[in-house]
Amino acid sequence: MKTHNNFDEPFEFAGKVKTWSLVMIAVGVIGVLLGFLTNDGERTFANLLLMGYYFTCVCLAGVFFCAIQYAAQAGWSASLLRIPQAFIKVLPYAIVLLLVIVASGMFITHTGTDEEGHKAVVPYLYKLWAAKGLTTPGSENYDAIIAGKSGFLNKPFFFIRLIGFLVAYAICGRLLVKYSTEEDDMGGMFNYKKSFKISCVFLAIFGFTVPLFSYDTIMTLDAHWFSTMFGWYNLAALWVSGLAVITFFIIMLKKQGYFSWITENHLHNMGILMFAFSIFWTYLWFAQFLLIYYANIPEESVYFYKRWEPEFKPWFWLNIVINFAAPFFLLMSRDAKRLLSRIKMVAIILIIGHWLDYFMMIMPGTVGPQSHWYTEIGWIEPCVFIGFAGLFTFLVLTALSKFKSLAPKNHPLLQESLHHHI
Amino acid sequence: MSSTKYILGLFDDPDEMMNGIDNLQRNSVPIYDVYTPMPIHGIEAKLGIKESRLGYAAFMFGCLGGTIVFSMICYMLVLDWPMNIGGKMHFAVPDFIPITFEWTVLFTAFGMTGTFFFATHLFPGRAPRVMDLRATNDRFVIAIDAKGNIPHDDITNLLKQSGAVEVKHNDRKYVSYE
């Protein structure tokens, strides 16, 4: 076993990776511009919202990962904490991007179709509750259900909640990174104890508010419908996709020759987490589905009715296959979790799978059915995905290269992590 | 010929016992088994123990339980006595999934318990047999099959050198708690 690790070798972000991530961003920008130019504004906005939300969720998963490790005083992960910390550093960009997308989608209007299929001037996003006159009694657009929800679901309060939650998460994340980098210089237990406290505070805030965050951003696209499972279902999606992205970054950075101290034992743990939380995701997905299926109340089952239209049904089933069956069978045995190639494959499957998961949450309520099931995913979807993937890679690797050392070298549990063996 | 069947080296410290294993292996003395009151990290690799197949047993029991209950529900609710429940079709798979899941877990749990009892010769009502009573208390025991492993005195010396607090030459393989 190697006994000496050079933690002070910083990450150098250059070469092919940088070029390719910039190319990917360019693809995304071109895709979005073409989307607007070809008069597919609503579809482009829906895709932007999808990826903006996904982007924010993965960064939040970075905060969540660090906070859990500190709050549980876990040792195994100490040497890989810089990767989720780089995600945390990207969180502010993600928040600004998401807010810009949400705000412009809500305030820029176009002539589209309202829920009855009539031509009307509606905003690009959240047309079911943010369009004009929905809550004004006597207006021709008046919608009693939306009016009943307007005490909670109105534009000012919506933005107060969204900004409040996201800023709170960003501050907690920022503090975690700050304590960890200060720990590198100072040593001692002082910063570790502070990290523990802020992690507990973050987890309490996050646990109570993340369902509201996903209700606001995603569930209100289908404003007449509600599900109390939706928040936890989204938390599970956030966490699984975050774990998959963290694992993917670990493997890619290892292939570049960095993080030589991360062994198959750490990947085994990441594999266990991905496996377990994929099942957790399925459990929540199913809990939401079964109750609605069983009770069969029209106001609830309308959500799945839309997703069982022939245009969406193949994707609906594919969602279960790649987010449940694939990780379940590919990662079941112990040996599979210790194979770098297998873990990488599952991470990629889950990253794409949870894109599809968010796709299934967003598209039926915004764009609606296209002509065929296979035209549901056209050229805009991959372009926007590639663009955001490039942006994320670029920002995370830039953030990672700013760290002076690639492991928190004075972390009190670092030795445990370096000798982690299962 | 001596009537010794097994030689036991009793250690009171796990590190010394690991050292003892090294010492014996260096001198090409095959080790029958090692008994410790607590799990010791890395001992399987050192002794070259094959990985447990309990996981495969668990998987098979899970499949068995899932299959049994799914067929049972299908027979009861679809073939034998179809009922109209909330207008659903009779073969309403989502409704069957929770019970299928439960039985999968139940069969896995019971099956693994049974497999464990079978593999370790433990059965309810049967007094467990061990090679040394203190191996479940505070002693770390290395057992060596005495047949063919001679001279016994050399083995005794190796164990003593490695820090064994006691070396036993047992005529019987097991002692019982009875």
Image (cartoon, coloured by chain):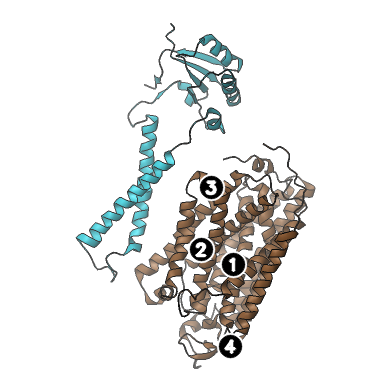
Image coordinates of residue A15 in percent, x first then y, are 74, 59
Indicate whether B165 appears above or below A368.
above
Image coordinates of residue A216 in percent, x first then y, are 56, 73
Label 2: how many Cα within 10 Å (few below 14, some 14–19, many 20+): many
The residue sitting at 60% across, 18% down in the picture is B162
Front-most of A125 and A315?
A: A315
Disc 2: which chain? A
Name which of mark 4 and mark 2 comes first in the sequence. Answer: 4
Residue type, label 3: Lys
Front-most of A57 and A161?
A: A57
Name which of mark 1 and mark 4 comes first in the sequence. Answer: 1
> Do the dots labelled 4 and 2 sit on one chain?
yes
Residue type, label 4: His
Estimate the spatial distance between the alpha carbons at disc 3 and disc 1, rounded to whole Å.
25 Å
Name which of mark 3 and mark 4 comes first in the sequence. Answer: 4
> Do the dots labelled 1 and 4 sit on one chain?
yes
Estimate the spatial distance between the alpha carbons at disc 2 and disc 3, rounded to whole Å.
26 Å
Q: Which residue is mark 1?
A: A54
The residue sitting at 53% across, 59% down in the picture is A349
Q: Which residue is mark 2?
A: A232
Question: Which image quadrant: the C terminus of chain A?
Answer: top right
Name which of mark 3 and mark 1 comes first in the sequence. Answer: 1
Q: Which residue is mark 4?
A: A110
> Do the dots labelled 3 and 1 sit on one chain?
yes
Label 4: how many Cα within 10 Å (few below 14, some 14–19, many 20+): few
Estimate the spatial distance between the alpha carbons at disc 4 and disc 2, rounded to whole Å.
33 Å
Residue type, label 1: Tyr
Is residue A168 in view?
Answer: no
Q: Secondary structure at mark 4?
A: strand
Image coordinates of residue A201 in percent, x first then y, are 63, 58
Tag of residue A337: 3
Question: Is label 2 or label 3 in front?
Answer: 3
